[in-house]
Image (cartoon, rainbow, N blue to C red):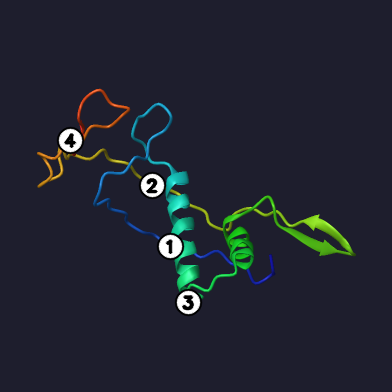
Amino acid sequence: MPGDFRWIHRKYTVEFLTPAFLGGADQSGQWRTPPFKALLRQWWRVAYAARCKYQVDVQKMREAEGRLFGNAWLTQRVNGREETAASRSMVRLRLSSWAAGGRKTWQGLDSQRVQHPEVNQPVGPHLY
């Protein structure tokens, strides 16, 4: 990266307005940074496309994304040879606290249930 790189610290409070799965492979709820970073990356793409008035050069977008979020695939030409330009992500996340929610249902949706192929019973907004 160029020498003008500097850390920018921001603190945000996140509140979920819809159910969100943030757990690990054992299906337990826990704060994890990978889902947040994936969402940031996705919304970065949306903002990038909007800034380009949706006339996106995908290769240029992927290069900019790779420089910001890290990559293992970018290359650069050095002395006539292709060399890797892999880099770590410039985005660092730290989640400071986790408190399990107290809601048992989502108001107004209590009676809505659907059959899901991976669950033996109809599921709905119940969070227990």
In the structure shown, which secondary structural element does the residue marked by tag 2 occupy?
loop
Give x and y (percent) for residue 4.
Answer: 65, 72
Which numbered mark, 1 or 4, is in the foreground of this view?
Answer: 4
Which numbered mark, 2 or 4, is in the foreground of this view?
Answer: 4
In the structure shown, which secondary structural element does the residue marked by tag 3 occupy?
loop
Query: Mark 3 or 2 closer to N-term?
Result: 3
Q: Which residue is mark 1?
A: 10
**Disc 3 marks which amino acid?**
Lys
Query: Mark 4 or 3 closer to N-term?
Result: 3
Which numbered dot is residue 53? 3
Which numbered mark, 3 or 1, is in the foreground of this view?
Answer: 3
Which numbered dot is residue 96? 2
In the structure shown, which secondary structural element does the residue marked by tag 4 occupy?
loop
In the structure shown, which secondary structural element does the residue marked by tag 1 occupy?
loop
**Disc 4 marks which amino acid?**
His
The C terminus lies in quadrant: top left
Q: Is residue 60 left or right of residue 121?
A: right
Query: Which of 74 and 121 lies nearest the eye of the viewer?
Result: 121
Q: Can you see residue 9?
A: no
Give x and y (percent) for residue 7.
Answer: 55, 64
Query: Mark 1 or 2 closer to N-term?
Result: 1
**Disc 2 marks which amino acid?**
Ser
Give x and y (percent) for residue 121.
Answer: 21, 25
Query: Which of 36 and 10 lies nearest the eye of the viewer?
Result: 36
Measured in 3D between alpha carbons, the distance from the residue under mark 1 to the one under mark 4, in whole angstroms, is: 34 Å
Query: Mark 3 or 1 closer to N-term?
Result: 1
Measured in 3D between alpha carbons, the distance from the residue under mark 3 to the one under mark 2, in whole angstroms, is: 36 Å
